[in-house]
Structure formats: structure tokens, C-alpha cells
């Protein structure tokens, strides 16, 4: 069956369609996305403005039409920190449902961390043993560890690359003073969740999921995405430390020319590098493996597991209505 996953993130809004069935590898079919940083639409009270809500609803309607056009049978729609932390998040979710008929599920930080771990576990398998996974998003940073499909501990802290860039690295390129202050803030924020995670003992493998980790691995010499997901990609702390210094001296315009760095992420890749470097140093991890799967894949796989027990689903009402309106 064809499944759609609508991801309302901090940097982008993204619909991914996959062909999938229980027990099989989900195969990407098509995607539709656009850059949309909802945090840029926050007012002084932390509310998402009418303009930001309009942009969000416009995209969701586009995604709805895209999913119907490509005959999606099921649609998972979720949002993370951008809406979760806004003052009027509940009102925004209600408006989205009223104007689009799509209900966005608001994931907590811990749920986001756990579902990402679930995807990483499925990718690496039981043979990986105990996994410690790190994930850098636009608004938050997730840490999870466990020996089963779901982690024994899952943490989420406000250390997303986009958030830190806005709040701590206003200059382009940033000053040495601002970077020093940010490094201190990252270390202080990570101290408690890392100490809690370390009570579980040493993992067998440390993984990193998210576009930020993929970009950092590519910058430091890992294989390009064109070589496919099955090539092993690693990120070494020694290389990361060197490149954190180099990125600190570069403007965002210069960073756009680095391999694996898109224009949309050029400004925030330094903050991502600082978070990754600090986390690896505090965990005393010299090398991590980059995982191709993350949150979206975790939600897809979890949904497929539900289908094993619940049986096939009818198409969601909003998709069915759209098809009927198009005469399909």
C-alpha cells in the first residue's frame, strides 16, 4: 500500500510517499516539500502569526492534493517542536484541522526521540546490540539508548541547530565570543540527559540520524547520497573538531559550497556541528555511524506494525473526498 507521512518540522514541511507493506522495506515513491521555518513567524508572545498559519495551511492543502493524486491509502501527519513549543500551538492545530480536515498529531520530545530510535533499530537490526542514537533537528536534539526496539531512555532538549543559530549566532560569520558562549550553553544543557543515559552502561554502537549528521559526515569525507543508503558512513570526532573550527571562520555563503550542505542549512550547520562535537566529547565517543532512517521512517514502520494486528485501513476521509471531487 502507499503511505504518506506529512512532517511539519522546524525548518521544512515535507510530505513523503512510500510503497510499503508489513514485513517489507518501505520504498520511497515521491515527495513534496518546501522550506518553511515556523519559528520565524513567532510574535513577541510566542504565537505563530496569521501569516505563518496561512503558509502552513497552504502547504498542507498542497500535500493533501499530492497524496490524493498519487493514490495514498493512509496519511500520517505529525508536528514537532515548532508547533509544540508555540504559545498558540493548540489553536493552530485546531485551525489546521478545521480548514484542511487533516489532524496533526503533536509529538512530545520524548516520543520524537523514541520513534527515531525505533527506526534506527530497524535499520541496524538486533545484531547491533545496545544502540545510543543522537538526532539533531531544527528545534531540538534527541538522545535515546536501549537494547530493544524502543529505548530504555529517551530525552529531548532545546538544542536544535536552527534554534541555536537564531538565539546565539546572530553574526555571519559568528564571533569567537558568541561561539564560546554557545559551547558553554550546549555543555550545560547536555549534562543532565547525558548523565542519565550513561547509567545504562556503554552502548555497542553509537548512531546519528538527521540531515545535520548526514551533512556533517559528508563534509568530513563520507560518501555522497548518490551512492545510496547501504554505504557505511561514519563521523569521527577528530574530523568534527577540525571542521567545527573551519565552519566557525566561514560565512553561510561560503558554507553553501561545501559538499552535502544545502542553501537552507548553510547558516545552521555550524550550530549542528557544535552540538554534535560536544555530545560526542561528553559521551567519550570517537566515532559514530550515520543512520539513513530517522523519525519519518519510524512512524511509517510503527504504522505498518499496527496494520498487522488491525488489518488494512480504508483511505482517510479527506483523501477520499478529494478523489471524488476530482472524479477519480
Image: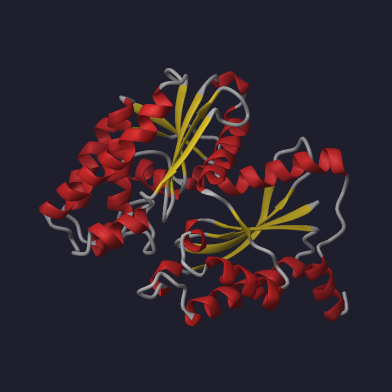
Classify residue 51 as left or right of residue 166: right
For image coordinates 59% across by 41% down, the residue present is 115
Rendered image coloring scheme: secondary structure
For image coordinates 54% across by 27% down, the residue present is 152
Q: Position of residue 3 (x, y in %)?
A: 74, 54
Residue 62 seen in this snapshot: no
Q: How many marks?
A: 0
Please say if 325 is above or below 116: below
In this rendered view, identify the residue nearer to me: 252 or 141.
141
Q: Position of residue 204 (x, y in %)?
A: 47, 19
Residue 46 seen in this snapshot: yes
Please say if 81 is above or below 276: below
On the rendered image, what quadrant is the C terminus found in? bottom right
Please say if 302 is above or below 88: above
In this rendered view, identify the residue nearer to me: 36 or 150.
150
Q: Position of residue 247 (x, y in %)?
A: 22, 50
For image coordinates 58% across by 71% down, the residue present is 91
In this rendered view, identify the residue nearer to me: 104 or 253.
104
The quarter of the displayed image where residue 128 is located: top right
For image coordinates 37% across by 59% down, the residue present is 265
Classify residue 274 as left or right of residue 206: left
Q: Position of residue 200 (x, y in %)?
A: 46, 20
Amino acid at each position: 500500500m502507499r503511505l504518506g507521512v506529512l512532517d511539519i518540522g522546524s525548518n521544512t514541511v515535507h510530505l513523503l510517499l512510500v510503497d510499503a507493506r508489513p514485513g517489507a522495506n518501505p520504498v520511497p515513491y515521491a515527495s513534496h516539500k518546501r522550506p518553511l521555518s515556523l519559528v520565524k513567524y513567532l510574535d513577541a508572545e510566542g504565537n505563530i502569526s496569521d501569516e505563518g498559519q496561512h503558509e502552513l495551511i497552504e502547504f498542507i492543502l498542497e500535500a493533501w492534493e499530492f497524496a490524493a493524486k498519487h493514490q495514498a491509502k493512509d496519511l500520517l501527519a505529525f508536528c514537532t517542536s515548532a508547533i509544540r513549543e508555540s504559545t498558540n500551538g493548540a489553536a493552530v492545530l485546531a485551525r489546521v484541522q478545521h480548514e484542511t480536515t487533516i489532524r496533526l498529531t503533536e509529538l512530545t520530545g520524548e516520543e520524537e526521540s523514541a520513534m527515531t530510535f525505533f527506526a534506527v533499530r530497524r535499520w541496524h537490526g538486533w545484531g547491533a546490540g545496545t544502540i545510543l542514537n543522537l538526532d539533531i533537528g531544527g528545534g531540538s536534539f534527541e538522545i535515546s539508548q536501549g537494547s530493544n526496539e524502543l529505548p530504555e531512555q529517551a530525552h529531548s532538549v532545546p538544542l536544535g541547530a536552527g534554534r541555536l543559530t537564531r538565539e546565539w549566532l546572530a553574526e555571519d560569520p559568528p564571533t569567537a565570543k558568541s561561539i564560546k558562549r554557545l559551547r558553554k550553553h550546549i555543555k550545560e544543557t547536555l549534562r543532565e540527559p547525558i548523565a542519565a543515559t550513561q547509567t545504562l552502561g556503554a552502548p555497542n554502537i553509537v548512531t546519528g540520524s538527521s540531515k545535520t549528521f548526514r551533512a556533517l559526515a559528508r563534509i568530513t569525507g563520507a560518501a555522497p547520497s548518490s551512492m545510496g543508503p547501504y554505504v557505511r558512513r561514519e563521523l569521527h570526532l577528530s574530523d568534527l573538531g577540525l571542521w567545527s573550527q573551519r565552519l566557525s571562520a566561514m560565512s553561510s555563503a561560503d558554507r553553501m559550497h561545501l559538499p552535502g550542505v544545502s542553501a537552507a542549512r548553510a547558516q545552521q550547520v555550524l550550530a549542528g556541528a557544535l552540538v554534535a562535537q560536544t555530545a560526542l566529547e561528553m559521551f567519550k565517543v570517537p566515532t559514530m555511524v550515520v543512520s539513513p532512517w530517522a523519525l519519518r521512517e519510524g512512524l511509517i514502520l510503527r504504522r505498518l506494525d499496527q496494520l498487522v494486528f488491525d488489518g488494512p485501513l480504508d483511505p482517510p476521509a479527506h483523501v477520499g473526498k478529494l478523489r471524488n471531487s476530482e472524479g477519480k
